[in-house]
Amino acid sequence: MHGFSKVLPGLLVFASLAGCGGDSISNERLLDAFEDGRTSIWVSGQAPVSQILGDEGIGGPHQRFVLRLNEGVTIIVRHSLQASERVPVERGDSVRFHGRYDWEASGGIISLTHSDPEQPGGGGWVEHKGVRYD
């Protein structure tokens, strides 16, 4: 039994990493926040890039792109280029994300998509073609 307790944690880590690549992430929490007009909550999701926007300098340099959820809601991702590297997205690419959601009438904004130990869960990320940018 003692050997099992040493093997089990390793198996759990392996099992959790094995699902990171292509597993689907639900947009349910994000869509609920949009419907309820909630803001400043942490969400995860996935969606295709529908538009590449120019970089923004407010609060430091940020890469910006628009995601269109299959429910017709558009989300702008503001990804810090000061805290992370640029995500090489193109129109039509699918991305997965985790960050802080702020409500807007057309959908909202996802920000804080970078590693930050002072944020819940250590901050956010954007994943593109299996590479995580945080």
Image: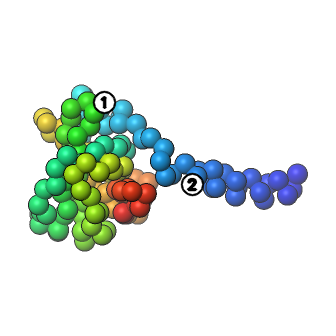
**Which circle marks residue 17 in the picture?**
2
Tag 1 residue: 32
**Residue 58 x, y percent position in the rendering:** 11, 63
Q: Earlier in the sequence, mark 1 or mark 2?
A: 2
**Residue 62 x, y percent position in the rendering:** 19, 63
**Foreground: 110 or 128?**
128
**Which circle marks residue 13 in the picture?**
none
Q: How many marks?
A: 2
Disc 2 residue type? Leu
Mark nearest the camera among 1 and 2 is 2
Q: Does residue 57 appear to the left or right of 45 in the view shown?
A: left
Would you identify the image quadrant in which residue 60 lies?
A: bottom left
Would you identify the image quadrant in which residue 72 lies?
A: top left
Who's the residue at 55% across and 48% down the image?
A: 19
**Residue 129 x, y percent position in the rendering:** 39, 56
Q: Give neighbour class at mark 2: few <14, some 14-19, many 20+ (Cα, 10 Å).
A: few
**Foreground: 45 or 130?**
130
Who's the residue at 13% across and 36% down the image?
A: 106
Q: Give neighbour class at mark 1: few <14, some 14-19, many 20+ (Cα, 10 Å).
A: few
**Foreground: 100 or 28?**
28
Who's the residue at 29% across and 51% down the image?
A: 93
**Residue 56 x, y percent position in the rendering:** 12, 63
Cα gap from disc 1 to disc 2, whole angstroms: 28 Å
Who's the residue at 35% across and 36% down the image?
A: 27
Residue furthest toward the right?
Answer: 1
Q: Is residue 111 visible?
A: yes
